[in-house]
Amino acid sequence: MSQPNVKAWLTLGRVSNLPTVWTNTLAAALLASSAGALAPPSSLVWVLLLITLSMLYLAGMLLNDWLDADWDQQHHNPRPITLGLASRRHVGLATALLLMFAAIAVLGLSRLIDQPHWLFGSVLLLVGCIVGYNLLHKKYAHSVWLMGACRSALYLTAAASLALPPEPIWLCAVLLGVYISGLTYLARQEHRNTLISRLPLLLMLSPLALAIYATNLWFWPVLLLWLGWLGWHYYKHLAHPQQRNVRVFIGAGLAALPLFDALVLAVANQPLGSLVCVLVFFLLPHFQRWIKPT
C-alpha cells in the first residue's frame, strides 16, 4: 500500500477540530494568568504548549483509528484505513512519532517554567485518559467520561504551564469534560443514526453554570450565540426522527467548543481573547466541510 496522501492524513487527525485545542489552550492559560495574578505565558512557552497539546491530540486521533480498524471494517465505517487510503503500520508509526515529539516538547517546556511537576502530572493524566479511552470505548459505554477527561486534562495542562492550576480552572475543566462526555455519548450512536436518550443533551448544557460567575455584558451575547447554535442544530438534525442526522449534530457540537472558551474568557474579563475564540467558531464549520470532524 502506498503512503496515504495529505487529505487522508488530515482526515485521520481530524484536523478540522484542531483549532478547538488551541482555543482551549488559550482560554485555560489566560484564565490561570488572571486568576493567579500571573503574567501570561511567554512566546516560547506558548509555542511549546501548543505543539505539545496539538501533537497529543493528533496522536489520540490516529490511535483511535489504529485500534478501531477491525471494528470499522466490520461496520463499514468509512475511515481512511477502512477505505485503503492508509495502512495500520503507517498510522501506528505516525502515532509513535507524534507521542515522541510531544514528549520532547514537554521536556523543553519544563525547563522554562518554575513548577514543572504540575506540568508533568497533568500531561501524564492527559496521556492516560487518551490511551484509556481508546482502549476501552468500544467495550464500555461509560468510557465516554474518559474522553471528557481528556479535554479537562488539556485545560489543566495549559494552566500548569504557569503554576499550580488555580481553583477556577478546575471548575471550567469539569464543565468542559461534562460537555464533551455528553457529546461523546451521542457519538456512540452515530453509525446507527439513532437517539436513544436525551440525557446526553442535558450534559451538554453544563457550560450554563458559568453564568453564575458572569460579571460583564460580553458574556451574554456569547451565551446566546452558543445556545442558538446548538438549539438550531438540535431542531434541524435531532428533534425529528425522519430528518435525524446525528453525525451533523456531533460536528456542530464540536464546532461550538470555541464558544465555551469564549464564555470562560468573558468570565475572566479577557474580552480580546474571547473575541478570538468567537472568530474561530465562525471559521470551524468551513474547515469541517473540507475535513470530516468525526
Image (cartoon, rainbow, N blue to C red):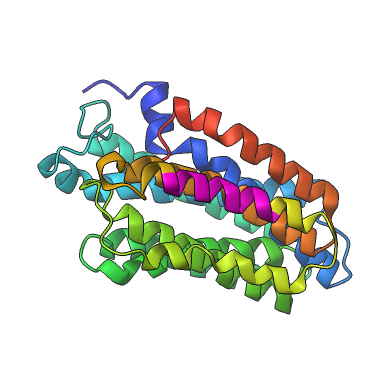
Residue 107: image quadrant is bottom right
**Magenta region: which residues?**
223-235
The answer to whether residue 113 of the structure is visible from this angle is: no
Q: Position of residue 161 (x, y in %)?
A: 71, 62
* Residue 66 shows in the view: yes
Magenta-drawn stretch, dominant element (helix, strand or loop): helix
Q: Is residue 191 left or right of residue 230?
A: left
The residue at the point 71 percent across, 58 percent down is 263
Q: Nearer the viewer, residue 217 or 176?
A: 217
The x and y percentages for residue 117 are 65, 74
- Residue shown at 30% from the left, 35% from the top: 90
Q: Is residue 62 magenta?
A: no
Q: Quadrant of residue 106?
A: bottom right
**How many marks overall?**
0
Q: Residue at x 25, y 61 (%)?
A: 196
Image height check: is 73 above or below 153? above
Q: Is residue 233 magenta?
A: yes
The residue drawn where x is 59% and y is 53% is 227
Q: Nearer the viewer, residue 163 or 266?
A: 266
Please identify the quadrant where the N terminus is shown.
top left
Residue 160 lies left or right of residue 60; in this view the side is right
Spot occupied by residue 61 in the image (x, y as percentages of width and height): 40, 46
Q: Position of residue 171 (x, y in %)?
A: 64, 75
